[in-house]
């Protein structure tokens, strides 16, 4: 009989130690070491038996001898989800979906399962957090009517494998992976050992039987998926469903994708009957823009393969205290501090002694350097209390010397601006192509921040 031993495992990073410690030596987190029973090692080494015998007798092959088969992608029926996945769902892919509680993860998965079922695919939806009647209530609200959508409330990994063997689905949804447990691990559901064991069995199940699998994962207080980082390494794709409290707008981002780009985003709006795709996010972000307000500038941010026009707002106000405040939402606070210094040093605006607030409307997060010039324009507009023309778009990277640097995909940004009715674009001069004039819109190229301010005011 194989011997078992007790180890202490960090619930944050998965590091194990033979004795308890108050602080994890790997991730340096306090109070995360919990006692677990280490599973006995299997003595049947070398046989390579996977779930249902799906992966057996594997042999090394020459790379040139392996048949080149095109990756089969199937549509989920939701265009924005297909976009983030890289064009569709790959057979045998293991996709991890994370997000804050109540953001809409289960709603998105149930809608996708229904759409796949309507397109002819067989789907097994495993819920470990709700009863079948509760899930049915949500399905009725969402209008789910697919005949090939099967539902089971289950938390045992062994019984899930039995259901998969009976139903033979093309798509499997696990909501959520933290509720599953396997008898091969003796720790409690949701622990590091259970997550490792369950995800490993789901990976073999997905690859061996070519079942596309969605795993819904909980997140921690800092926004990362709960459990060890190895969980993200085991899956093929990691998606984060993001949004802000009080906003109906939701963004689906790919953090990792073995079968596509990680720069794509999917845009949704939460309504009474579920999530609705937003075909034109730019129009939604600009719908409530206040005309004639100072500190408001529209910028074209490139997300994946498409530009999105969003409003950058700034408020610069004299502070009654000794130390001015710097508050940002949607942009990096360190970058804003850098741009304030450039604006004061190179443009001669006394903004260093003022409270500064910068916000991206709609709850979007802008990380690319092309938004620098719009942030500078919004700060200057609020400081001098003069509005920027509502039909002007601004984008470009700003260097420490006050120079405006070129950015990628300038043509696509201009085309999006023209489509939404903008009349003027201020952009880096190095992106300007004077030999290719653009009809219907005035393009102004600038080399320095001072030139941009002169063009705006």
Image (cartoon, rainbow, N blue to C red):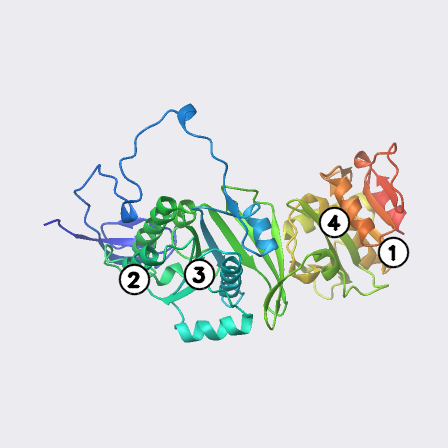
Q: Secondary structure at mark 1?
A: loop
Q: Secondary structure at mark 3?
A: loop
Residue denoted by label 3: 218
Residue denoted by label 4: 300
Which mark identifies residue 202?
Answer: none
How far is the residue under mark 4 from the one under mark 3?
32 Å
Looking at the image, is mark 1 or mark 2 nearer the viewer?
Answer: 2
Residue denoted by label 1: 389
Q: Earlier in the sequence, mark 1 or mark 3?
A: 3
**Callout 1 environment at 10 Å: few (<14), some (14 to 19), or many (20+)?**
some
How far is the residue under mark 2 from the one under mark 3?
18 Å
Q: Earlier in the sequence, mark 4 or mark 2?
A: 2
User: Decide: marks 4, 2 in contact (CB < 8 A)?
Assistant: no
How far is the residue under mark 1 from the one under mark 3?
44 Å
Residue denoted by label 2: 156
Looking at the image, is mark 1 or mark 3 nearer the viewer?
Answer: 3
101 relative position to 80: left or right: left
Tell me the quarter of the picture where residue 44 sits.
top left
* Closer to us: 111 or 167: 167
Q: Secondary structure at mark 4?
A: strand
């Amino acid at each position: 009989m194989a011997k078992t031993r007790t180890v202490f495992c960090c619930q944050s990073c998965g590091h194990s130690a033979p004795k308890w410690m108050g602080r994890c030596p790997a991730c340096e987190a306090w109070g995360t070491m919990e006692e677990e029973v280490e599973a006995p090692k299997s003595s049947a080494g070398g046989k390579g038996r996977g779930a249902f015998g799906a992966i057996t007798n594997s042999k090394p092959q020459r790379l040139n001898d392996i048949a080149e088969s095109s990756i089969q992608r199937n549509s989920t029926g939701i265009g924005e989800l297909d976009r983030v996945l890289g064009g569709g769902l790959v057979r045998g892919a293991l996709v991890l979906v994370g997000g804050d509680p109540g953001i809409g993860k289960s709603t998105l998965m149930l809608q996708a399962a229904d759409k796949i079922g309507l397109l002819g695919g067989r789907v097994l939806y495993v819920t470990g957090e709700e009863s079948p009647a509760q899930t049915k209530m949500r399905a009725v609200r969402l209008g789910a009517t697919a005949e090939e959508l099967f539902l089971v409330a289950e938390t045992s990994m062994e019984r899930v494998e039995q259901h998969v063997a009976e139903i033979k689905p093309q798509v499997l949804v696990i909501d959520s992976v933290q509720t599953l447990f396997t008898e091969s691990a003796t720790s409690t559901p949701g622990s590091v050992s259970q997550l490792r064991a369950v995800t490993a069995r789901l990976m073999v199940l997905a690859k061996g039987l070519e079942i596309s699998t969605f795993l819904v994962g909980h997140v921690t207080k800092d926004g990362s998926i709960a459990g060890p980082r190895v969980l993200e390494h085991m899956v093929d794709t990691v998606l984060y469903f993001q949004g802000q409290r009080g906003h109906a707008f939701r963004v689906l981002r790919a953090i990792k994708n073995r079968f596509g780009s990680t720069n794509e985003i999917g845009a949704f709006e939460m309504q009474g009957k579920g999530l609705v795709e937003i075909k034109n996010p730019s129009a939604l972000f600009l719908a409530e823009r206040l005309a004639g307000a100072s500190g408001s500038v529209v910028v074209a941010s490139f997300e994946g393969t498409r530009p999105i026009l969003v409003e950058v707002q700034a408020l610069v106000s004299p502070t009654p205290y000794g130390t001015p405040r710097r508050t940002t939402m949607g942009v990096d606070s360190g970058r804003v501090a850098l741009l304030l210094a450039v604006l004061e040093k190179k443009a001669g605006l006394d903004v260093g002694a003022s409270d500064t607030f910068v916000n991206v409307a709609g709850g979007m997060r802008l990380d690319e350097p092309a938004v620098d010039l719009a942030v500078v324009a919004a700060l200057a507009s609020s400081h001098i209390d003069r509005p920027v023309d509502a039909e002007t778009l601004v984008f470009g990277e700003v260097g420490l010397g006050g120079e405006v640097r070129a950015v990628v995909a300038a043509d696509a940004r201009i085309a999006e601006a023209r489509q939404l009715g903008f009349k003027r674009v201020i952009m880096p001069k190095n992106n300007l192509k004077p030999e290719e004039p653009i009809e219907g819109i005035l393009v102004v190229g600038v080399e320095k921040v001072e030139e941009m301010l002169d063009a705006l005011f």
